[in-house]
Image (spheres, helix red, strand yellow):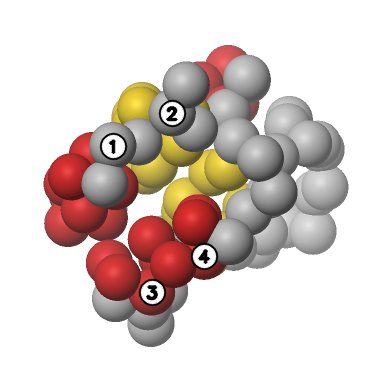
Amino acid sequence: MAKKIAVEQSLTNITEALREKGYDVVDLKSAEDAKNCSACVVTGIDSNVMGIQDISTLAPVIEASGLSANEVCRQVEELPV
């Protein structure tokens, strides 16, 4: 079974790269979308401006800012099963 990865909608190049590698990719629009995912990929643009730290998922969060699609894919591949 492929890992399920939640990716912010604006990261289309990363979504496409992960799908090409066989991952089940879902759009990350709300905290609900992160449930039952192996990881979440975010832009980092909205990076905790108010200092609020509500945990929505225990899955690793990969901040894609400054990373290529291949670098993000490599980080996803290195995640524990």
C-alpha separation, residue under disc 1 versus residue under disc 2? 7 Å
Residue 81 location, quadrant:
top right
Tell me which amino acid carries mark 4.
Answer: Gln
Which residue does the numbered mark 4 point to in the structure image? 75
Which residue does the numbered mark 2 point to in the structure image? 2
C-alpha separation, residue under disc 3 versus residue under disc 2? 19 Å
Tell me residue 54's x, y (percent): 81, 38
C-alpha separation, residue under disc 3 versus residue under disc 1? 16 Å
Please rate how many residues cluster around mark 1, counting C-alpha atoms within 10 Å: few if below 14, some from 14 to 19, many from 20.
Answer: few
Q: Give the secondary structure at mark 1.
A: loop
Of the pair 51 and 72, the residue shown nearer to us: 72
Mark number displayed over residue 71: 3
Of the numbered discs 1 and 2, the one sitting upstream in the chain is 2
Tell me which amino acid carries mark 3.
Answer: Glu
Q: Which mark is nearer the camera, 4 or 2?
A: 2
Circle 4/circle 3 CB separation < 8 Å = yes
Tell me residue 51's x, y (percent): 79, 58
Vertical placement of 2 versus 42: above or below? above
Of the numbered discs 3 and 2, the one sitting upstream in the chain is 2
